[in-house]
């Protein structure tokens, strides 16, 4: 048989083309493949984490409704705020002796919080009048804080007076974002999603982002006092862009009206007014007003504890620990409690919100009394955790009551205005905490009186509302 000859141009394992292919595998092509593999390995922690976050925030229809984007935006907001907090705390609080720090913080509160308290009631009603520009309002609040972070980066080094008006601007912008965010959530509910569950997801996303950003901010602070503010600038610029990625329905005000925090129709409308013909009355109902008062007591206690314990633990830190570590322990305890309260609130959904509010307020009152009588480091950390837990769970229960009892036409406005009142309560509690003498037992006794008063003034109304089962509005 004649041997078969391979044509000159044929390919094969031993042909010239096979040799070229082998050279590509062993030469520059293999090097490029190795570089790509290394690049993918280095890139994966970032892309993998981003994909994991996106998968979590967009689950159960949140991606299709737009709620997932709001969760991510709120996470950016929380991370940026904590960067500014780290920078200001290091400048105003930790950089000077305790006595001087109290004066500086008092001055900071007087210059920033006092005008903020006057402006806070105006922000909600003002934003009520521009419902068609909510995305622009959120982006404006983000951009304002980005620019103010640059101003603060110069003030923390020079110690100039521009620090105080810039800090006031940050507070007002943060408040404006919070009011608009509360009004936006009802517009982004996925199918079969309760408002309580949506708010708990948004809040939990912000808490997780804050917990991640806090140690990063502390690390940047070690490089220089400006660096946390540079980080805040980058985050708020990203938030400005993300605000415009929210769905256009956020800017729709169709079917909405303004809410007034009145307890009954007679008080709101009066005998001289004609009864309204539109579905639902412009009133939030007695259950909501009582629940709001209880939440205000918890917020007031929270503001009080933040400022009082900050100075108390600086002067008398936890045994064997520095002041910064002592404050860190209390802060982590409060954060863990807040996250746990949010998770429990999402699990309970809207089951007996009046009873939940009364229970958590009673628990935090009992914890405050116990910590006052048997003052100690462990009890203080436990009180911070219980206060954080109570604040989160009571707020979600208030959200459930608003969803249950407030007519849909005014529900968005009711969320915004209730959040304004809660912010003002926090400021009031902080002012009380800053002027208290540094005596643990006496200070926590005042805290117990604050939350006890709120519980006693609301217990009868909330129990009556729970027996009646609300106003019968559709959920």
Image: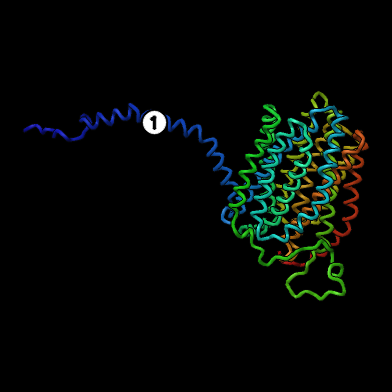
266 over 308 or under it: above or below: below
Q: Position of residue 226 (x, y in %)?
A: 69, 32
Q: Residue 256: x and y, percent? A: 70, 65
Colour option used: rainbow
Image quadrant containing the N terminus: top left
The residue shown at (17%, 35%) is: 10
The answer to whether residue 269 shows anywhere in this view is yes
Residue furthest to the left in view is: 1
Which of the 4 image quarters holds residue 154? top right
Residue bearing mark 1: 32
Identify the secondary structure beneath mark 1: helix
At horizontal 74% and vertical 62% (from top left) the residue drawn is 404
Q: Quadrant of residue 125?
A: bottom right
Between residue 359 and residue 196, name the one nearer to us. 196
Q: Is residue 313 above or below residue 168?
A: above
- Rendered view: 253 above or below 110: below
- The quadrant of the rendering that contains the C terminus is bottom right
Q: Is residue 231 left or right of residue 33?
A: right
As drawn, 385 above or below 297: above
Q: Residue 357 in the image: x percent, y percent?
A: 81, 52
Marker count (numbered): 1
Residue situated in front as seen by the camera: 128 or 350: 128
Q: Nearer the viewer, residue 306 or 129?
A: 129
Q: Is residue 466 visible?
A: no
Residue at image point 75% right, 58% down: 126
Instruction: Name the residue: 86% across, 33% down.
Output: 102
């Amino acid at each position: 048989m004649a041997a078969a000859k391979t044509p000159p141009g044929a390919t094969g394992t031993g042909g010239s083309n096979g040799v070229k292919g082998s050279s590509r595998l062993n030469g520059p092509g293999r090097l490029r493949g190795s570089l790509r593999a290394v690049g993918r390995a280095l890139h994966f922690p970032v892309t993998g984490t981003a994909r994991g976050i996106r998968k979590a925030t967009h689950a159960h229809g949140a991606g299709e409704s737009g709620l997932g984007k709001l969760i991510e935006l709120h996470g950016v907001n929380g991370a940026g705020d904590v960067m500014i907090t780290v920078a200001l705390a290091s400048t105003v609080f930790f950089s000077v002796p305790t006595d001087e720090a109290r004066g500086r913080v008092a001055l900071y509160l007087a210059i920033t919080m006092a005008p903020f308290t006057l402006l806070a009631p105006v922000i909600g009603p003002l934003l009520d009048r521009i419902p068609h520009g909510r995305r622009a309002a959120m982006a404006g609040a983000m951009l304002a804080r980005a620019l103010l972070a640059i101003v603060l980066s110069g003030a923390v080094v020079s110690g100039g007076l521009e620090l105080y008006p810039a800090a006031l601007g940050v507070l007002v912008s943060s408040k404006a974002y919070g009011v608009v965010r509360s009004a936006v959530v009802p517009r982004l509910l996925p199918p079969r999603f309760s408002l309580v569950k949506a708010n708990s997801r948004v809040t939990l996303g912000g808490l997780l982002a804050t917990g991640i950003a806090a140690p990063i901010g502390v690390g940047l602070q070690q490089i220089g006092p400006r660096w946390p503010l540079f980080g805040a600038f980058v985050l708020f610029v990203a938030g400005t862009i993300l605000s415009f990625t929210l769905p256009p329905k956020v800017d729709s005000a169709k079917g909405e009206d303004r809410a007034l925090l009145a307890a009954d129709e007679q008080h709101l409308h009066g005998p001289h007014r004609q009864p309204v013909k539109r579905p639902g009355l412009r009133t939030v109902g007695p259950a909501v007003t009582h629940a709001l008062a209880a939440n205000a007591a918890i917020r007031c206690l929270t503001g009080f504890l933040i400022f009082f314990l900050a100075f108390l633990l600086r002067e008398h830190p936890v045994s064997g620990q520095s002041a910064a570590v002592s404050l860190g322990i209390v802060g982590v305890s409060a954060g863990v409690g807040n996250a746990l309260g949010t998770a429990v609130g999402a699990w309970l959904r809207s089951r007996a919100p009046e009873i939940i509010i009364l229970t958590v307020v009673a628990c935090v009152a009992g914890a405050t009394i116990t910590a006052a009588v048997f003052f100690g480091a462990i009890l203080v950390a436990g009180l911070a955790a219980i206060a954080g837990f109570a604040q989160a769970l009571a707020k979600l229960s208030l959200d459930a009551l608003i969803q249950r009892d407030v007519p849909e036409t005014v529900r968005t406005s009711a969320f915004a205005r209730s959040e304004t009142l809660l912010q003002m309560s926090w400021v009031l509690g902080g002012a009380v905490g800053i002027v208290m003498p540094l005596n643990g037992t006496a200070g926590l006794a005042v805290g117990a009186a604050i939350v006890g008063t709120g519980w006693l003034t609301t217990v009868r109304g909330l129990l009556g509302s729970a027996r009646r089962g609300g106003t019968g509005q559709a959920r």
